[in-house]
Amino acid sequence: MENDTNQNVDSLTAGFGIAASVAILFSTILTVAKESTPSLLTWMKTVTMHHWITHGFLVVGLFVILGLLLSRMNIQIRATALTWMIFISSALGGLGIVGYFLLA
């Protein structure tokens, strides 16, 4: 009997799983960018009165839009590959933020 984790996930799961990985990395890049660019931080504060609210809107917006677009592409990806993709992007994102604040 074949292991379920060796099968392809459905297109909705694939699209939003990949979108989650991209959103995690985007959030990391945006965090470093706004912390190292005062004008970006100021702009983000003026949009919603707090930079973390703007940050959240941007990340969630990217996740939803990209997830919907990718879901329509009928991407074939195995469950284990998608799991590793999300795990690695989370690890890189966490290390990126920790590394930035340790070195800044």
Image (cartoon, grey):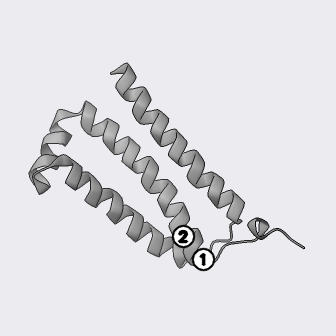
52 relative to 16, above or below: above
Place residue 83 in its image quadrant: bottom right
Q: Are marks 2 and 1 in contact (CB under 8 Å)?
A: yes
Q: Is residue 7 left or right of residue 36?
A: right
Residue 69 percent coordinates (x, y): 47, 74
Residue 46 percent coordinates (x, y): 9, 50
Label 2 crowding class (10 Å Cα cut-off): few <14, some 14-19, many 20+? many
Which residue is drawn at the image coordinates 51% and 46% (left, top)?
A: 90
Disc 2 from disc 1: Cα separation: 6 Å
Q: Is mark 1 on a helix, strand or loop?
A: helix
Q: Residue 93 carries which label?
A: none
Which residue is drawn at the image coordinates 33% and 36% (left, top)?
A: 32
Q: In this view, does 99 lie to the left or right of 84?
A: left
Residue 64 percent coordinates (x, y): 39, 69
Q: Is mark 2 on a helix, strand or loop?
A: helix
Q: Can residue 25 be seen in this view?
A: yes
User: What amino acid does circle 2 point to?
Assistant: Gly
Residue 15 percent coordinates (x, y): 54, 70
User: What amino acid does circle 1 point to?
Assistant: Ser
Which residue is drawn at the image coordinates 16% and 38% (left, top)?
A: 39
4 relative to 34, above or below: below
Q: Is residue 65 left or right of residue 92?
A: left
Quadrant of image for the C terminus: top left
Label 1 crowding class (10 Å Cα cut-off): few <14, some 14-19, many 20+? some
Q: Which residue lies furthest to the right in this view?
A: 1
* Residue on which the image places disc 1: 11
Quadrant of image for the N terminus: bottom right
Which residue is drawn at the image coordinates 37% and 48% (left, top)?
A: 27
Q: Residue furthest top?
A: 103
* Residue on which the image places disc 2: 15
